[in-house]
Image (cartoon, rainbow, N blue to C red):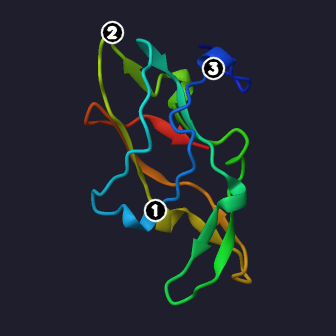
Amino acid sequence: CNCCDQIPSDCVFTVLETETMLNLLDYVDGASALLGSVELEAGDYLQLRLVVDIEKSTIKFEGDETQYFLQIPSGGTSGIKIKGNAHNPLFTIEEGEEADLVFDFDAQMSIIVNQDKDKYKLNPVIKEVKFRNQVIDDFETE
């Protein structure tokens, strides 16, 4: 599929359709969660998009029972994007291959707090992306 802002429907693969609640701080020091699996055709894949339910995206602090709204720009529409740099593929699937795609999300570095400490925004910091247990060095997030 060609890289563009309007992605043709035959280029979109849904991995997870059911609602899943994750506390990202539960997944530190190598702990991981399987979000889903999908069978893909052999070929180059330019990007991965994580679309989230922005109405249910909250942040909670230790010692405070209040759940604060977490703004995630484009998170509910086009999604958080992880893509290869300069139109290079993020990863390539070979014919008949099974592989895991793992990304290391730094939750603490990703939260931006406004000056009044009453608004919270997610600016995703993905420290590392691995495919076939190999680190992908050339990627960017939006």
One can see residue 136 in this view: no
Give x and y (percent) for residue 115.
72, 80
| Residue at screen point 56% across, 44% down | 18
SS at circle 2: loop
In the image, residue 44 lies at what x, y percent? 46, 16
As drawn, the label of residue 67 is: none
Depth check: give the residue in front, 85 or 28.
28
Q: Residue at x 37, y 37 (%)?
A: 137
The residue closer to the viewer here, 116 or 96, is 96
Amino acid at dot 2: Glu
In primary-sequence order, the first of circles 3 and 2 is 3
Q: Earlier in the sequence, mark 1 or mark 3?
A: 3
Specify the amino acid type for callout 1: Leu
Tell me the residue that label 1 is attached to.
24
**Image quadrant containing the N terminus:** top right
- Residue 3's label in the rendered image is 3
Q: Amino acid at mark 3?
A: Cys
Q: Quadrant of the C terminus?
A: top right
In space, the residues marked 1 and 3 are separated at their CA atoms by 30 Å
- Position of 92 relative to 106 (above/below): above
Near mark 2 (Cα within 10 A), the count class, few <14, some 14-19 or many ≥20, is: few
